[in-house]
Image: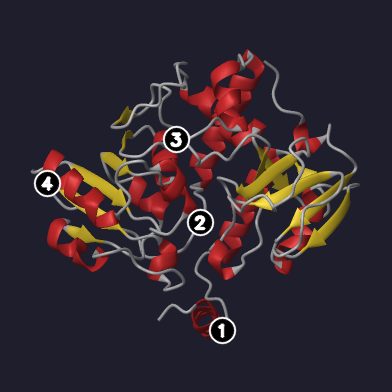
Amino acid sequence: MNPPPALLSDWPDIVTVHGFPRWKWRYVRRCLPGRRLKFVGADAGAPEAGGLLLWGMAPVPAGTRANLPVARMEDGFLRSVGLGAELTRPLSWVIDRRGLYYDSSRPSDLEELLEGWAMPEALRERAAALRQGVLRAGLTKYNLAGPQWQRPAGTREVVLVPGQVESDASLAFGAPGLRSNIGLLQAVRAAKPDAYLVYKPHPDVVARLRRAGIAESRAAEIADEVMTDSPMQNVLESVDEVHVMTSLAGFEALLRGLKVVCHGQPFYAGWGLTEDKLPIPRRTRRLSLDELVAGALILYPVYIGATSPIEPEDALAELASWKSREAGTKRPFQELYRALLRLFIGVR
């Protein structure tokens, strides 16, 4: 099997971009330079010709021809310095023509790559170098600043439980069992009665840009510590194990050599690298960590430069520089901006 053609290279020249917020338009143009892009609203009908690009799991417009090429776009795994909910410019997106990486009910382009394509040695070596670059720069998806977290004194096992936005599509489509943060915490406490549990709410919830989960306010009754403001990178450096539903923190933990237990079915589960509570029979191949990295960070995403796509290594350097510039700085009017966003999306 060959990797999917890069950037829809075998698609029609005209692409209808359906239902994307206006602030994303410029970045879609950078992802697909030279394409004739037609931006339409979410209430627009089916295009008559060309290809159709949707955001996330948005439904295909009624009346779309069965043979019309359809792809979906979503955030990449090394995205920005700042939250997507704050409309921070992205450095990576993914474009998928089979499904999406977080929809475990069907194969995605990423799953097809990981399951069926033999990674050549040169690609594995490139992935290893990229992974080491991520670790040296201390990069995660959002690269938020904050105070350093200190592991509690003593030899007790420390387990991280990252929270998620419970309305997020990755839970709706990638977690057939547990779909609540409090449920995950309860399951981890039952499995690890003597461990020191650290619960880290999702940063969008901490910023009050997304709603907290059902009974998530009870997290402190189960976890030994609820930690809200320390950077994910710092926390991952100080724990022994990570339990997730579908959180990207599990992938970030794998990059750092940590044990990861998956209670859902994220894209990085099922390859022999994680302990999986819900096996995925389609995923039969046993991957090395760098084969997973090659698929997830090199072959699958689109990295967005100033005018056109760039290589992963260039994006890594830009993200590290961006993170360094932002370190210790306070964004002017950030709280006012967040307050306006909360008002707009109806989160108190």
* Viewer-side label of 3, 4: 3
| Dot 3: element | helix
Count of numbered labels shown in the rendering: 4
Image quarter (top left, top right, bottom left or bottom right) of the C terminus: bottom left
**Label 1 is placed on what type of residue?**
Phe
Query: Taking 122 as reference, is 215 above or below it?
Result: below
- Spot occupied by residue 160 in the image (x, y as percentages of width and height): 27, 48
| Dot 2: element | loop
Q: Which residue is mark 1?
A: 333
Quick check: marks 3 and 1 in contact, CB under 8 Å? no
Which residue is at 48% across, 52% downward? 169
**Label 4 is placed on what type of residue?**
Gly
Report how far apart the C-alphas of labels 2 and 4 lie in the structure: 29 Å
Which residue is at the front of the view, 192 or 315?
192
On residue 154, which mark appears?
A: 4
Give the left or right position of residue 159, taking residue 194 as reference: right
Of the numbered discs 2 and 4, the one sitting upstream in the chain is 2
Query: Taking 137 as reference, is 331 above or below it?
Result: below
Of the numbered discs 3 and 4, the one sitting upstream in the chain is 4
Report how far apart the C-alphas of labels 1 and 4 lie in the structure: 41 Å
Query: Taking 330 as reference, is 238 above or below it?
Result: above
Of the numbered discs 2 and 1, the one sitting upstream in the chain is 2
Using the rendered image of the protein, determine whether residue 129 is visible from the camera's viewpoint. Answer: no
| Dot 4: element | loop
Using the rendered image of the protein, determine whether residue 209 is visible from the camera's viewpoint. Answer: yes
Q: Which residue is mark 2?
A: 143
For the rendered model, the colour scheme is: secondary structure
Which residue is at the front of the view, 256 or 198?
198
**Label 3 is placed on what type of residue?**
Leu
| Dot 1: element | loop
Q: Which residue is mark 3?
A: 255
